[in-house]
Amino acid sequence: MKAHHIFHNSGGQFSKNTVHRNKTFVLVTKTPIMIPMIPFRQLFTFTKPEVAEAFKHAHLKKYHQGLTLLQAPLLHASHHEPYGKLLIIIAASAGKAHERNAMKRRLRSVFYEAKLYRKDPSFWILIVKKKAVGMPFKDIENFLQESLS
């Protein structure tokens, strides 16, 4: 088993994190504490029944410049570590493939890096229209931050 060591400087003291696959061990004193990490793909992967159930219970949360955000309750959430998931829907008519893919990457990036999946354990459905595909990154970030927190 291969481990990656990460060192952090916290207030003049260094702490050592060891990452094994999907778990992080943090060395605080002499005993490591296990903190589970949520894999990136797990936040954006869905089964057909999950999507069907989400659309049944979804309601409009916010609309802004071609971005429609729907919210549905997470029915599969575990009691120990619930987290939100994001489904991104962009029609082929919204632009060329590289433009649609760039938009998806930006949306996923904001959702993951800002840890928005931890703020509200819901099933989020984001429908992107042609008007929103060329939107600047900062506007996308502000929309998601305001809507999901």
Image (spheres, helix red, strand yellow):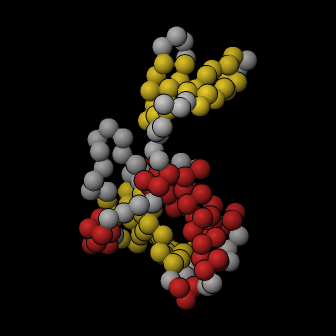
Residue 112 versus residue 62: which sits nearer the camera? 112
Relative height, residue 127 to residue 74 (above, below) = below
Residue shown at the point (64%, 77%) measured from the top left: 98
Residue shown at the point (45%, 60%) measured from the top left: 44
Residue 114 versus residue 106: which sits nearer the camera? 106
Residue shown at the point (39%, 51%) measured from the top left: 121
Residue 4 versus residue 144: which sits nearer the camera? 4
Residue 101 position in % (x across, y down): 60, 72
Relative height, residue 79 to residue 117 (above, below) = above
Residue located farthest toward the right when viewing the structure as drawn: 12
Residue 8 position in % (x across, y down): 67, 26
Please indicate whether residue 106 sits to the left or right of residue 71 in the image: right
Residue 100 position in % (x across, y down): 59, 76
Residue 68 position in % (x across, y down): 49, 75
Residue 146 seen in this snapshot: no
Please indicate whether residue 20 sits to the left or right of residue 11 in the image: left
Residue shown at the point (59%, 57%) measured from the top left: 110
Residue located farthest toward the top when viewing the structure as drawn: 30
Q: How many marks?
A: 0
Residue 2 seen in this snapshot: yes
Residue located farthest toward the front when viewing the structure as drawn: 1
Please indicate whether residue 57 sits to the left or right of residue 29 in the image: left
Q: Quadrant of residue 48?
A: bottom left
